[in-house]
Image: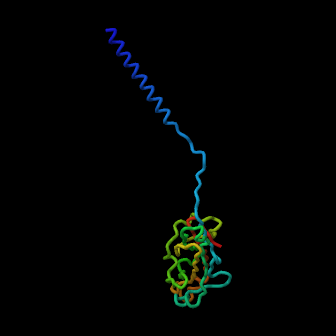
Amino acid sequence: MRKGYKITLGLITIMILLTISVGTSYSYYSISDIQKEENNLTTTCFKIDFSGSNDIALNTAGKFAYPMSDVNAANKLTPYTFTITNSCTTSNAASGVNYEIVFNTKGDLNDYIRYKLDEGATLGTATALTDAQPYTYAQYFPTSKKMVGTVHSYKLKSGTLAPAASQTYKLLLWIDENACSGEECDEKIMAKTFEGQILVLTSMGVLSS
């Protein structure tokens, strides 16, 4: 009986030693380390330049706009012209720059304004400003770039500029000929104001003059 007891005790002792050995080995191989060096990311050139004033006004400084047809607007008005340029080159940029042309507005004439945006020799279509695509991320405009008192923001155009490429746009704005007629125009239109601001946005921020 005593002999059998000794054998059993010996087996239990061996199992305990094996358990301690396995536990020690696991602890040794699960040691971790913390990264001490910084990760460095490199990007290519990404920059758009804006040429031209970015403020537009109707019915200000004693100069009053009046309702007119789309044909008269296209033939008689001087368009607001601006150019955007991708100032990167093929040597420091692998691809083009995406951009959006956004128009901020304020004043009392927003519902009566029509516009046409021409791209080079391509003639745009006359459209009610309120039919333009609303720009829903206006809250991200930097305060230093946003026109004070902005009420509405619209995306007029989006595109991509290849390295070293440029694009000139011509914007016409006028009051819809159906906005009023006769004496009612004096109160409904002539006493109102409209101000706008062109912004060119990329995913890196806002760039304008």
Q: Quadrant of residue 20?
A: top left
* Rendering coords of residue 137 (x, y %): 53, 65
Residue sitting at 61 percent across and 76 percent down? 195
State which quarter of the image contains the C terminus.
bottom right
Between residue 95 and residue 125, name the one nearer to us.
Answer: 95
Colouring convention used in this rendered image of the protein? rainbow
Q: Quadrant of residue 46?
A: bottom right
State which quarter of the image contains the N terminus.
top left
Between residue 137 and residue 38, name the one nearer to us.
Answer: 38
- When the figure is inspected, residue 86 is found, relative to residue 126, above or below; the finding is above
Between residue 8 and residue 207, name the one nearer to us.
Answer: 8
Residue sitting at 45 percent across and 29 percent down? 23
Residue that lies at the very extreme toward the left in this rendered image: 1
Residue sitting at 34 percent across and 12 percent down? 5
* Rendering coords of residue 93 (x, y %): 57, 68
Q: Quadrant of residue 140?
A: bottom right
